[in-house]
Amino acid sequence: MKKKWRIIFGLIVVVAAAAFIFTQLRQALPVAVQRVEAREFVQSFTEEGVVVAGEEHTIYSLVSAPIERLLVEEGERVQAGQLLAVLDARELDFGLEELAARLDGLAVELAQARENLAAAERHYERISRLYKSEVVAAVELEEAERMVKGAQAAVAGLEAQERALLSQQERLQGQRKDYRIYAPIAGVVTRLTAREGSLASPQTPLLALLNEEGKQVETRVLTRDVHQITEGMPVQLTFKLRDQDIEFPGQVVDIAPYAEEAYSPLGLAEERVKVTIAPQFPAEVEIKPGYKVDVEFITQVIPGALVVPKTVLFSDGGEDALFVVEEGRAQVRRVTTGPETRREIVITSGLEEGDLVILDPWQSGLAEGVRVSCQ
């Protein structure tokens, strides 16, 4: 009796297993699909760029002197012609006072020398008349002439000293304006190293001024890609905020005529070319010099292209292929590919608009001929 029940139980198990297998075989495999539609395909590559000021001036002192007053702070906006700093001009004033004293003394000497010259000339005239009247000898006339020449030389020497001192005085007076430092352009104060009481000199920069008008974007492009870029070419710029990306257009205005060596994030040496872009900055956010932006260079536009994600492709007999859904079953379709981006690729043959492409060709249970249900 027990043997009979064991046989019946075994048959029940076999029938249940067969029913389960039959059900599974008839059940369709759910797959994610994408309907192929003709659309515009844009091929591009992206580089990191940095916003640079349209104009930057580094401010130096033209003279060596202590900074008496510093009138600006880091980050402050100033106007062209605004006073930035005042230098201590006491040494200059001492020099001017010394020159004034020397000129005063020289004026006294010069007045005396001119009187001496006038006296020598009068003496010569008197001796000359007496010599013509044969009252005095020629030697006295020669002596009177020598005295005139000596007096003339003394006046000429003092006048030369006076011109030199006046020239020095004029130079020092002209330097007075160099002790007051003004902004040559309107801009923002950056790299402020000057401090009140410290020594300003022509060799040490005091600060820099960034003129934010005419800001540009600079990026470095690999030499393998730069041949695809031309002046006047439009680009797409993206400034990343914490919660959104701000996109705005730009245009290539300059391509450097040479490459420079740079290093990739992995430390590999690369040859890159500087490309300058004129951006159309958005009004809703202020993008300042030094900010980073993404620069997308659009190198090709194909209208009416059939585009799929690159991840749908696999190799079938050495050729590119993908899965499509035909009459509820997965079918392998060999295709020919065209231009691509990092995520998408153009299919030039093998697909038709409206085809359903299976997005995950490596899904478990997926094979050619398997019944599928689209999701």
Image (cartoon, rainbow, N blue to C red):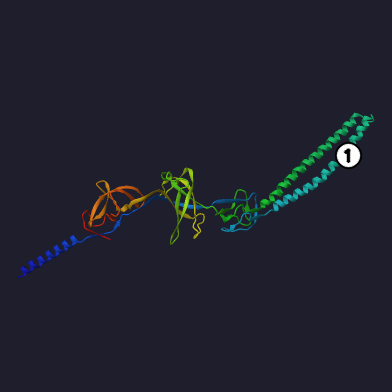
Q: Quadrant of the N terminus?
A: bottom left
Q: Quadrant of the C terminus?
A: bottom left
- Say how many tags the image has: 1
Horizontal side of residue 352 vs 215, given as left or right: left
* In the foreground, 177 or 126: 177
- Tell me the residue at 75%/45% (across/down): 166
- Tell me the residue at 27%/46% (across/down): 319
Q: Secondary structure at mark 1?
A: helix
Measured along the vertical axis of the image, is residue 77 above or below residue 128? below
Q: Position of residue 3 (x, y in %)?
A: 5, 68
Q: Position of residue 310 (x, y in %)?
A: 32, 52
- Tell me the residue at 70%/53% (across/down): 90
Q: Position of residue 249 (x, y in %)?
A: 46, 53
Mark 1 highlights which residue?
119
Is residue 265 among the parts visible in the rendering? no
- Tell me the residue at 49%/44% (across/down): 256
**Dot 1, how many residues are within 10 Å of its Cα: few (below 14), some (14-19), or many (20+)?**
some
* In the foreground, 258 or 192: 258
Horizontal side of residue 198 vs 28, given as left or right: right
Q: Amino acid at mark 1?
A: Ala
Q: Position of residue 88 (x, y in %)?
A: 67, 54
Measured along the vertical axis of the image, is residue 62 above or below residue 141? below
Hey, which residue is sitting farthest bottom in the picture? 1
